[in-house]
Image (cartoon, rainbow, N blue to C red):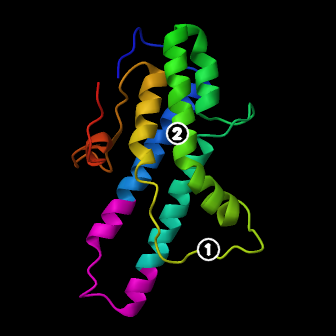
Amino acid sequence: MKLGAQLKQTPELEAVQLECLNLLIMYHAYRETISRFNAGKGTRWDLCFWLVQLRAMENDIILRICRLDDDNRTTHSFREAMRSVRPDFTDSEAKAIDQMLKDYRILINPLKTKARNYYLAHLNKEAEAQWDPQGGFEQSIPMIVNIVDSISREKQAYTLRVASDMPELNLRQALGSEQKS
């Protein structure tokens, strides 16, 4: 999404861009782990370990999704990234992004209250962490990509190359929905 002139990079903006890249890498690994498991060829131990891997990946994804919504000046987050570049936006552009951040907060609130706050970041005395994969975060990932693009004033490239002789993976395309420009 190109909103206007390219912004100068700030540490806060770079941090959320990098966090978005890391989130997309983890989400891609999560989806690949799901699709590559063959229940017909694995043992019960394989199934158990596969479920543990998926749950650990989900926990990482949930924590990444939630920390982008932090509202603390001592941590990197969407709000801090926007504060760092707000002077470069018109009032209407800034209000549009602020609305995106409000919508994001509403969308991820169940993840924050029922997962992160309940048994991931804190261990509520009544908490029982699920061992099987739960999902429920998929909708927030394209929204994160759109927010980062909007705050950055340009569509970000998210690519991964695991070796020089391997093709580059476009994580935005791998997400399954090319983001609107």
Badge 2 marks a residue whose secondary structure is helix
Q: Is residue 117 magenta?
A: no
Q: Position of residue 129 (x, y in %)?
A: 61, 74
Answer with the quarter of the image where residue 10 lies: top right
* Boundaries of the magenta span: 30-49
> If you read the primary sequence from the N terminus, does the residue marked by circle 1 or circle 2 appear first?
2
Viewer-nearest residue: 164 or 119: 119
Q: Position of residue 126 (x, y in %)?
A: 74, 75
Residue 132 seen in the current view:
yes
Answer with the quarter of the image where residue 115 lies: bottom right
Mark on residue 104? 2
Q: Residues within 10 Å of mark 2 (few under 14, many from 20)?
A: some
Q: Position of residue 141 (x, y in %)?
A: 42, 45
Residue type marked 1: Ala
Q: Residue at x 55, y 62 (%)?
A: 59
Where 106 falls versus 50 (above or below)? above
Where 13 falls versus 123 (above or below)? above
Q: Residue at x 43, y 18 (%)?
A: 153
Q: Report the side of 177 relative to 126 (left or right).
A: left
Q: Quadrant of the N terminus?
A: top left
Name the residue carrying label 1: 129
